Image (cartoon, rainbow, N blue to C red):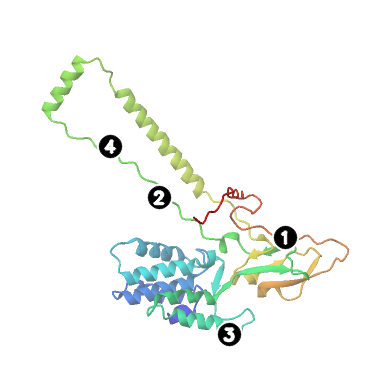
């Protein structure tokens, strides 16, 4: 746990190398701590920044699903999966502010979280140590102007992890059943009496359909494997999801309308000065997150009139 707290969000290979063998330790309490610590270190990391992310994600899912796993290890895997995907993968784990000062609220939250083994409802206190990884530009009226931010890195380096694909149910192959000689004779007699058609054509059709399906699936897989040429930069719009390591390669696209009051590489909320006084500011329109809007919702009908009698 000390290793996970000290190296939180760094994706340090040396720390992961120390924790990796601990995930297979015979003591389940050790496994629990190793799973949680690994998630703290790998939070907001992709396969490009840390190749071990995929293996640890698979490990968390395996431990959670396995019925034979101990409860302590399962609890650790559940917490680990929640930490690595915390805040919809839009937050990081840090005990310092953006300016480098100690964030006492985050320190207290982390301290209380480490006592989850004594009382599990203390686990959500870790949320106090989460910091949103964003870059939001605001004008003098505290509104978001339309701006473009250039990230001088490939989009896949800081992209969201791909969504989990549901496994398709494999069709069971038809197994040829053993036929007794007596049953075969009875069938021959029945077929000789009845004028039924042979099922050879139907079997051939089924085989052809199976082959066509297999060809289509192979073509789809080949198309997925074909990687398109990836650009060396990405243009983000305000507000943007910008991770801690990404701040080093981020810069504002020079439009001549706004000047930042502090360096953009700090991240978080950046105040902007509007230079072009004569031109109108283009602002980002606020959008309701999810759910139907209040205007679209149908109001319930009023209750029917009635008389109230005390008797």
**Would residue 215 be found to the left or right of residue 190 on screen?**
right
Q: Nearer the viewer, residue 222 or 98?
A: 98
Of circles 3 and 4, which is in front?
3
Q: Position of residue 65 (x, y in %)?
A: 35, 61
Mark 2 element type: loop
Going from N to C along the chain, the mark reached first, 3 or 2, is 3
Residue 15 location, x and y as percent?
A: 44, 77
Residue count near mark 2 (Cα–Cα under 10 Å), binned few <14, some 14–19, many ≥20: few
Pointer 3 local density, CA inside 10 Å: few below 14, some 14–19, many at least 20: few
Q: What element carries label 1?
A: loop
C-alpha separation, residue under disc 4 versus residue under disc 2: 21 Å
Q: Earlier in the sequence, mark 2 or mark 1?
A: 2
> Mark 3 and mark 2: span between their CA atoms?
45 Å
Residue at point 34% right, 77% down?
30
**Where is mark 3, residue-wise?**
102
Q: Earlier in the sequence, mark 4 or mark 2?
A: 2
**Depth check: 66 or 219 in front?**
66
The tag on residue 167 is: 2
**Image location of residue 259, percent across then percent down:** 78, 70
Indicate which disc, 3 or 4, sits on the residue closer to the N terminus. Answer: 3
Query: Which disc number belongs to residue 174?
Result: 4
* Image height of 285 relative to 116, above or below: above
């Amino acid at each position: 746990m000390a290793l996970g707290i000290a190296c939180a969000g760094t994706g340090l290979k040396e720390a992961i190398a120390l924790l990796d063998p601990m995930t297979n330790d015979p003591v389940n309490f050790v496994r629990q701590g190793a799973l949680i610590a690994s998630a703290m270190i790998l939070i907001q990391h992709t396969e490009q920044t840390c190749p071990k992310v995929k293996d640890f994600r698979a490990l968390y899912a395996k431990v959670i699903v396995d019925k034979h796993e101990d409860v302590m290890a399962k609890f650790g895997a559940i917490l680990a999966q929640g930490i690595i995907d915390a805040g919809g993968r839009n937050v990081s784990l840090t005990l310092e502010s953006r300016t480098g000062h100690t964030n006492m609220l985050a320190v207290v939250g982390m301290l209380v979280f480490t006592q989850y083994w004594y009382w599990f409802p203390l686990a959500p206190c870790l949320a106090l140590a989460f910091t949103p990884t964003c870059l939001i530009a605001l004008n003098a009226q505290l509104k978001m102007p339309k701006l473009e931010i250039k990230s001088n890195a490939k989009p896949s380096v800081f992209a969201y992890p791909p969504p989990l694909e549901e496994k398709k149910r494999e069709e069971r192959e038809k197994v040829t059943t053993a036929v007794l000689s007596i049953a075969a004779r009875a069938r021959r007699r029945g077929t000789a009496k009845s004028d039924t058609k042979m099922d050879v054509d139907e079997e051939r059709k089924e085989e052809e359909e199976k082959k066509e399906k297999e060809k289509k699936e192979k073509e789809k897989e080949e198309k997925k494997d074909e990687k398109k040429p990836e650009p060396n930069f990405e243009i983000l719009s305000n507000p943007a999801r910008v991770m801690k390591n990404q701040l080093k390669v981020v810069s504002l696209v020079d439009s001549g309308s706004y000047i930042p009051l502090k360096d953009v590489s700090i991240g978080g909320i950046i105040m902007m000065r509007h230079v072009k006084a004569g031109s109108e500011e283009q602002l980002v329109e606020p959008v309701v997150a999810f759910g139907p809007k209040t205007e679209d919702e149908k109001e319930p009908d009023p209750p029917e009139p009635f008389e109230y009698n005390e008797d």
